[in-house]
Amino acid sequence: MTIALAARSERRSLGIDVSRPVLYIFAGVLCVLIVLPLSWLLMYSVTDGKGGFTLANFYRLFTESSFREPLVTTFILATSSAFICCAVAAPMGWLVARTDLPFSGVIRALVTASFVTPPFLGAIAWELLAAPNSGLLNKLARHWFGMTTDQHLFNIYSLAGVIFVISCYTFPYVFVLVANSLDRTPGELEDASSILGGGRWYTARRVTIPLVLPALLAGALVAFLQAMTLFGSPAILALPAGFHTMTTKIWSLFQFPPKPELAAAASLPLLLLTVILLRAEHMILGRRGYSIVGGKYGTPRLIPLHRWRWPAVALCLIVLLNPVFLPYAALFNAAFSPVATTMLTVHNFTLHNIEFVLFELSAASVALKNTVILGTATATIGTALALIIAYITARQAVTGWRALGFLATAPIAIPGIVLGVGLFLSYTRPPFVLYGTLWILLVAFVTIALPSAYQQLQAAFRTIHPELEDASRILGASRLRSLWQITAPLLRTGVIATWCFIFVGVMRELSAAIILFTSETKVLSVLIFDLNESGDLGAISVIGLGMLLITFAVVITVNRIPGFGNVRLRNN
């Protein structure tokens, strides 16, 4: 009682509780981050070069072949990738989750490796492997089969090659959704079918597949969405092949002479389709629910594969050759070979590429410095913003908390290239002239990281009863002091994990950065993209392997935190 009276007396003497103004300030920052770039995007899309209103930008978008063909190509690419991902990931998810497949844990870990590999780095690795003239696989084919130098088995610079590479780094989304759905499906449902006389395949067709179908359909939509919005892989593989996707077309509109009005108009259909797909995914996953009467349910009974166990393992490893083993081997080979597309041997092993990156490539040190600064600042600011917004929505602390929750998750519907266009239009004129500085990249990275960070921390808030904060406030503490001294320490695990994965996400981000960077604000992902255009594949491999080592170190460290689950990273 004495403590409570003293605390109340202290608050009365100060006369001010800044908690509510601070919470409203954070809410205002969130509104600016989301609303400002989208407003400028919409305004520019209906503006001509002189500032007048026009719909000519949309007319050109749907009538000129230079815009219509990328739209068609993007649809074909996304549809094909989604189909391939489902065809590959669904059986793998079933094998890992529902059978006695040996090394299922190792296979899950390898899928995670393909999940965290930047798709643009995977595309470069497949350049090393399957370029028609210099690719390592084509060189081996000529050696083994006596083919001439103008013949090749693989051509990665084609629509089929782009679909293949994008599928390699998109199928983990479908795998995770299907495997997790199978893991959560109660075994009693299948047991009941067996007791009533249903055979194994009848049970699978009438019980298991209907239960997993919503997750599979959602996975197909996610795969379509990822393939549609990727920039790095199409830019590296499609442009040399002579065709555009929508993301590369939007990027090309910022080359000299820049056409921001057309870029804004081309971005809006991509944004609209993304919103529709995400809404469809939400409806599919939330359409049906299943519950078990009577409390806990048992784990599913694993189906014995018998003599098919090892062939199934071999099949999974063959699939994982494409996103993991072959690309990593190609990067390692290029990093330590005198020529990136020469097979590494004991006699030609060299450290020249490492020395070049460390001591001669001045842009590497600038890009590394910028990446570390932006990664640290983005992780810190993004985690703090997500923590405050999650607190507001979880505790309904201010008026309009539902709207804030919507805004916090809204950036997930904004493709990176579209966000880059919106930020470019927003911050190249007064009162916020940020272009050419690290600040504009910081704004972009915080906006991109916000949805996943918010969702993680909001889920963490639900595990902490508000009575702990109420007790603190009864004793005279303000909302902010209760959050800082009571709630935040209880959320320490989630906060640390969120910080680490935002940091890793900054290292991988390319789509928005490619629109917003300047020569002094390059980050590692942009540097890799530039080096690919100049053909410095050895240097790319060294930098790429360094990025992978850092990424895996952070992922392994975070997943060792007790109680921490899987976190979804945004691809580029």
Image: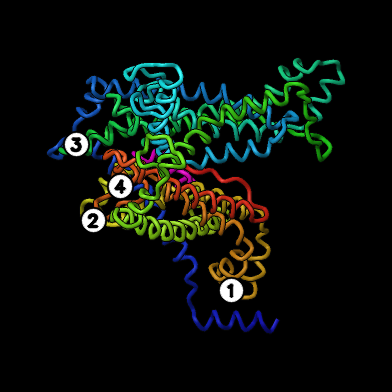
Q: Position of residue 97 (x, y in %)?
A: 70, 32
Question: Is residue 495 shown left or right of residue 52?
Answer: right
**Mark 1 surroundings within 10 Å by alpha-carbon count, few (fewer than 14), some (14 through 19), many (20 or more):** many
User: From this viewpoint, which residue is outermost toward the front?
Assistant: 347
Between discs 3 and 1, the one toward the N terminus: 3
Q: Is residue 147 above or below residue 530?
A: above
- Distance from Cα at disc 2 to Cα at disc 4: 11 Å
Depth check, front residue: 132 or 509: 132
Quadrant in which the N terminus appears: bottom right
- In the displayed structure, does residue 209 sit left or right of residue 568? right
Q: CA distance from mark 1 to mark 2?
A: 40 Å
Which tag, 2 or 4, sits closer to the chain's start? Answer: 4
Q: Can you identify the residue that label 4 sits on?
A: 423
Which residue is labeled 3 in the image?
Answer: 259
Q: Check disc 3 and give the amino acid type.
A: Lys
Judging by the rendered image, the residue that carries numbered circle 1 is 477
Q: Secondary structure at mark 1?
A: loop
Q: Looking at the magenta stretch, what is its main secondary structure?
A: helix
- In the image, taking residue 501 as reference, residue 289 lies left or right, namely right
Secondary structure at badge 3 equals: loop
Q: Which comes sooner in the sequence, label 1 or label 2?
A: 2
**Distance of label 3 from label 1 (alpha carbons):** 54 Å
Task: Tell me, yes or no, if residue 461 can be seen here.
Answer: yes
Q: Secondary structure at mark 2?
A: strand
Q: Quadrant of the C terminus?
A: top left
The answer to which image quadrant residue 124 occupies is: top left
Q: Which residues are magenta?
A: 406-418
Amino acid marked by disc 4: Leu
Q: CA distance from mark 4 to mark 3?
A: 15 Å
Q: Which mark is residue 433?
A: 2
Mark 4 and mark 1 residues within 8 Å of each other at the beta carbon = no
Kindly identify the residue that appears in the image at 28 percent across and 31 percent down.
249
